[in-house]
Image (tube, rainbow, N blue to C red):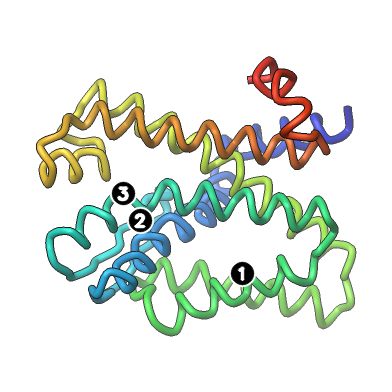
Amino acid sequence: METVFIVVVIGLLMYIPVIGPYFSLFNTLVHESGHAVIALLTGGKVKSISLFSSTEGVAATHHHQFGLILTSFSGYPFASAVSVLFIYMVEKEWYIGAGISLLVLLGYNLMFWVRNLFGIFWILSILIGTYILWYQNYLGVLEYLIIGISLVLWIQAFFSCWHIFLISFKTPKQAGDASILARLTFIPAQLWGFLFLLQGSLLFLIGWAIWFDMDLLSNWREVVQLW
């Protein structure tokens, strides 16, 4: 029951003004970093990443047509996969590994990708706050912070997939990545929204099984019933 309570509390915190958007930006950062990573892997270039107080983000990239399709698709799957990885690390109590991974993600983005003022301020506030906690030897607080951020990544990755799915049906021409993919492939935005939701739901369930220490192979029916 304690773990369920923690998940519910983290989910509710996302709707609190200032605090919710502040921590939701971790998911935005991972999402936009996913676009950037795939752009580089497909021979493209990353011009910049912008993060905004509304929790929205933009990754400006440059590459050929096929790379553009993969890059446009990569944000949601990348965020979902990374969230499951962090859930696995904190469930195994690999707090140092999870913490270093977050610091590397933040530091790399600060040095090479994030270029707008708010995004730079947000990353610096996280890095400075983390340094203060470490310097003051508040290691227990840091562990809880890492757990909280991991849960935020996991929950927000799932919520964002639901959001893009709903938007793709309500306003398909303003559905972010789904709209871009529709223009590039002539496949309806609704289908891309469904694919985002499908992968997000499956990875959310995998994260749920990991967090609640389930055996995915022997207890798959229990996982489906939870969904």
Q: Which residue is mark 2?
A: 57
Q: Is residue 65 left or right of residue 200?
A: left
Residue 219 location (% of width, % of height): 77, 25
Q: Which residue is mark 1?
A: 126
Q: Which residue is mark 3?
A: 73
Residue 190 location (% of width, % of height): 25, 26
User: Which is in the foreground here, disc 2 or disc 3?
Assistant: 3
Q: Can you tell which quarter of the image residue 67 is in?
A: bottom left
| Residue lying furthest top | 225
Label 3 close to label 1 by CB (< 8 Å): no
Q: Earlier in the sequence, mark 1 or mark 2?
A: 2
The amino acid type of the residue labelled 1 equals Ile
Look at the image and tell me in which quarter the N terminus lies: top right
The amino acid type of the residue labelled 3 equals Phe
- Residue at the spot 34% in from the left edge and 68% down from the top edge: 49
- Helix, strand, or loop for circle 2? strand
Label 1 close to label 2 by CB (< 8 Å): no
Category of crowding for the residue at label 3, using alpha-carbon neighbours closer than 10 angstroms: few (below 14), some (14–19), many (at least 20): many
**How far, Cα to Cα, is label 3 from label 1?**
28 Å
Q: Can you tell which quarter of the image residue 214 is in?
A: top right
- Residue at the spot 28% in from the left edge and 34% down from the top edge: 192
- Helix, strand, or loop for circle 3? helix
